[in-house]
Structures are given as structure tokens and as C-alpha cells.
Image: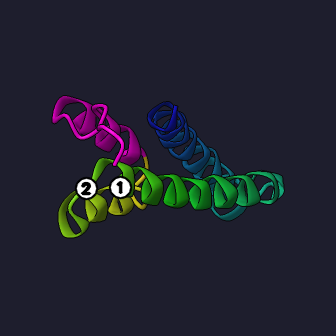
Amino acid sequence: MLIRIFKVVAVLEAFSWLALLIGMYFKWIAQTSEVGVQIFGPIHGGVFVAYVAVTALVARRQRWPLFWTTALALGASIPPFFTLWFERWAVRAGRLDAVPAR
């Protein structure tokens, strides 16, 4: 269940980042409206915090190395759409496979 939540939050983080960037375009470049930033700023902020929290839980459960997989997962939340790349990589690399409970 936690792995599925991680995957969903990774996708939501990427698309909320995109929505915020579009809102920032209209606010700062087109200078037409601040509505996109007002709406998607808090949404992206909440999803970002959720991504960090879920990443911490998954890292602990999956026993990810702190300075490689965990740092890569957290760093992937900064550039747009890198959470999607990380999630795909983690699946292919077996980092999201089921791990027996301690």
C-alpha cells in the first residue's frame, strides 16, 4: 500500500509542479493573472511535503541507503518531472520491491 501511495504522490508532485510553473508564467511573463500561483502554489507545497514524508517512510521500509537512493529520491522533487523519472528508475532497479517486515 505504501509503495502505491509513493507512486501516486510522485506523479501528483510532478504535475502540481507543472501547474505551478504554468501559473508562474502567467503571473511573471504574460503578466495577466496571479490566480494560477494562488491556486497551485499551496497545492504544490502540500504535495511536495507529502512527497518528502512518503519518501522518508518508503526509504525506511525499503531500507534505502541514505546517501544514494534516499538523497536521489528527495533531490528528484526539485526539477520538474524528475519524480516521475525516479519512480520509474526505482521500479526497474528493484528499489520498490516488497521487503519482508522486520
Q: Which residue is mark 1?
A: 59
Question: How far apart are labels 2 and 1 at the CA level?
Answer: 5 Å
Q: Is residue 4 left or right of residue 26?
A: left
13 to 76, vertically: above or below? above
Q: Is residue 5 magenta?
A: no
Q: Which residues are magenta?
A: 81-102
Q: Quick one: SS at disc 2?
A: loop
Dot 2 or dot 1: first in sequence order is 1
Instruction: Name the residue nearer the viewer: 39 or 12.
Output: 12
Residue at the image position 20 percent from the left and 70 percent from the top = 67
Instruction: Name the residue nearer the viewer: 79 or 93.
Output: 93
Q: Is residue 84 magenta?
A: yes
- Marks 2 and 1 in Cβ contact (< 8 Å): yes
Residue at the extreme bottom of the image, as rendered: 67
Amino acid on which the number 1 mark rests in the picture? Ala
Q: Position of residue 15 (x, y in %)?
A: 56, 39
Q: Quick one: SS at disc 1?
A: helix
Q: Is residue 98 left or right of residue 45?
A: left
Q: Which residue is mark 2?
A: 64
Q: Residues within 10 Å of mark 1 (few under 14, many from 20)?
A: some
Q: Is residue 80 left or right of residue 89?
A: right
93 to 19, vertically: above or below? above
Q: Position of residue 54 (x, y in %)?
A: 51, 52
Residue 91 falls in which quadrant of the image? top left
Amino acid on which the number 2 mark rests in the picture? Trp
Residue at the image position 30 percent from the left and 44 percent from the top = 86
Residue at the image position 37 percent from the left and 57 percent from the top = 60
Residue at the extreme front of the image, as rendered: 102
